[in-house]
Image (tube, helix red, strand yellow):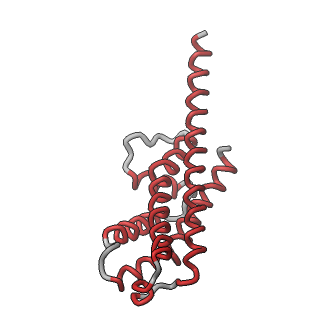
Amino acid sequence: MTENKYKDKYIDKYNIEQMRLRSAISECEKHILKINHAISKMESFMPLTPDKLNSLSEDDKEHIDQLIFRYSKLQDVMGEKLFPSVLINLKEDIEKKPFRDILNRLEKLEIIENADVWIELRNSRNILSHEYSSENNELSNNINEIFYKNTPDIFSIYYKIFEYVKKNIF
């Protein structure tokens, strides 16, 4: 009787962790869909220059806002939910581990290619969110970086994780 009780508890915990992983994936997919929509609307005026930025319509500015907001949300979900959930589903002990240790473990398991790339993406996003209303030259450069470099990079990281999860967890 006691053995069954522990077995059921383990199975329940495992199922809950798989549900959390599926939820994180679903949330990432929603943000990716919105990012792709914003990108499709922005293609006509990219790359940005300070002059272009000044002359954008309110609708165009909303697409930029959407890209930045969803990019930030995607990073948050991946870092706070997806990365830990993948490791938990692999029975890794991540309790009380700093985020950098989680990234390093994902890299060591070859789930992500390079932990430093994630840190660079995070730093770039933080700079943009703090300087969003500042000087147009730097702002247009940062938006171009999100559009042309960071979004493809974060998508690449996500899809590599997604393929790993499909192959090794689900």
- Residue 138, horizontal then vertical, whole percent: 35, 82
Depth check: give the residue in front, 153 or 1.
Answer: 153
Name of the residue lying farthest toward the front:
58
Indicate whether 51 appears above or below 124: below
How many marks on residues? 0
Q: Quadrant of the C terminus?
A: top right
Q: Quadrant of residue 110?
A: bottom right
Residue extending farthest top: 1
In this picture, is 25 found above or below 32?
A: above
Q: Residue at x 61, y 60 (%)?
A: 160
Against 63, is 144 above or below? below
Q: Nearer the viewer, residue 51 or 158?
A: 51
The quarter in which the N terminus is drawn is: top right
Residue 96: percent from left, percent from top: 37, 41
Q: Quadrant of residue 54?
A: bottom left
Residue visible at 44% across and 77% down in the picture: 143
| Furthest residue in direction bottom, as rendered | 51
Q: What residue do we see at 35% from left, 83% from top?
A: 136
131 with respect to 95 (left or right): left
The residue located at (58%, 83%) in the rendering is 44
Q: Position of residue 95 (x, y in %)?
A: 41, 40
Q: Is 10 displayed left or right of 166 in the figure?
A: left
159 or 29: which is nearer to us?
Answer: 29
